[in-house]
Image (cartoon, helix red, strand yellow):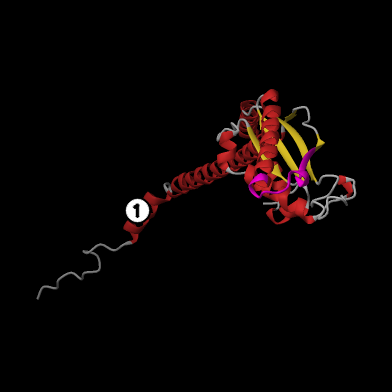
Amino acid sequence: MDFWGTVLVVFRRWFVTLPAFALAVGVTIAVYLSIPVTYTSTTVLVLTTPTTGGSLPSNPKYPNGLTNPLLNFDRGLSMTASILIGALATPETAAALGASPEGDPSYEVNNGSTNPELLAQTPFVFITGESASPAAARDIVMRVEARARKILAERQEALKAPRATFIRIDRAVPATMPEPQKGRKMRSAAVALALGAAATLVAAFAAESIAQAMRVRKGRKVRRAGGAADAEPYGPSTVSVTDRTRPRPSEGRQPAVSG
């Protein structure tokens, strides 16, 4: 059926479509109100080398020159950032930080991209906390940041790296103020409304199909009743005429001749 045919069915069966659509709108509102608003807070950390570089001078009399850490990025910092992201994303770390399996509060750690193949591309660590409470969202971000600093220090100490060459973590973006996120509510409401609209169309076409079937069945009954009424006056007269014109058994016999 084309577009205008569908519109015609919807308007012709308005007594079905209007209640169905009203019910769909009510369900959509209920779904929207049932999903709580969540808040997110984000911080961005950057890994930097010390001003004296990542190595000690071979001769203490000739110390290394000083460099700007923001101008001294190498692949080692990106690799270290990917190690931190992997360590912070484990379920054990999440449980230790108080992240709930149900997702409140929860956090996500990446390098700005959700593609795992790009983890070793940048020295940045993005931390995003989410919770139904603004304070909890920001608190989980601060706890993850503190754990990142602890993990980095423990890894470098375990490798017996000189403390003067330790990689540092600086805040590129401090933890932001928690902001409400309504995207999940809007997506759920949109899905509910789409399903309700589809159900409304199904109800309209079902009513149209039932009405057509009843109309066809009623037409058949009327035609049958009309045919029976037309055949009734001619039935007895036809039989009587046939009976009158049919010769009797006694007719046509010749009388017996006496000898």
Q: Visible in this render: residue 9?
A: no
Residue at far front of view? 61
In the rendering, at what x and y percent does residue 143 appear?
67, 31
Q: Nearer the viewer, residue 259 or 57?
A: 57
Residue 160, compared with residue 142, is above or below; it is: below
| Residue at the (53%, 45%) spot, across then down | 213
In the rendering, at what x and y percent does residue 33 appear?
64, 25
Q: Nearer the viewer, residue 135 or 170?
A: 170
In the rendering, at what x and y percent does residue 171 appear?
80, 36
Query: Magenta residues?
Result: 157-170
Examine the image and state in which quarter residue 166 appears: top right
| Residue at the (78%, 30%) spot, across then down | 176
Taking the image as shown, residue 13 lies to the left or right of residue 230, namely right
Examine the image and state in which quarter residue 193 appears: top right
Amino acid type, callout 1: Ser
Taking the image as shown, residue 114 lies to the left or right of residue 203, namely right
Residue 114 forms part of the magenta stretch: no
Residue 119, compared with residue 99, is above or below; it is: below
Residue 163 forms part of the magenta stretch: yes
- Could you classify mark 1 by the number of other residues whose Cα lies within 10 Å: few (under 14), some (14-19), or many (20 or more)? few
| Residue at the (70%, 53%) spot, across then down | 115
In the rendering, at what x and y percent does residue 58 appear?
81, 55
Disc 1 designates what residue? 240
Q: Nearer the viewer, residue 22 or 182?
A: 182
Residue at far left of view? 259
| Residue at the (77%, 47%) spot, across then down | 165
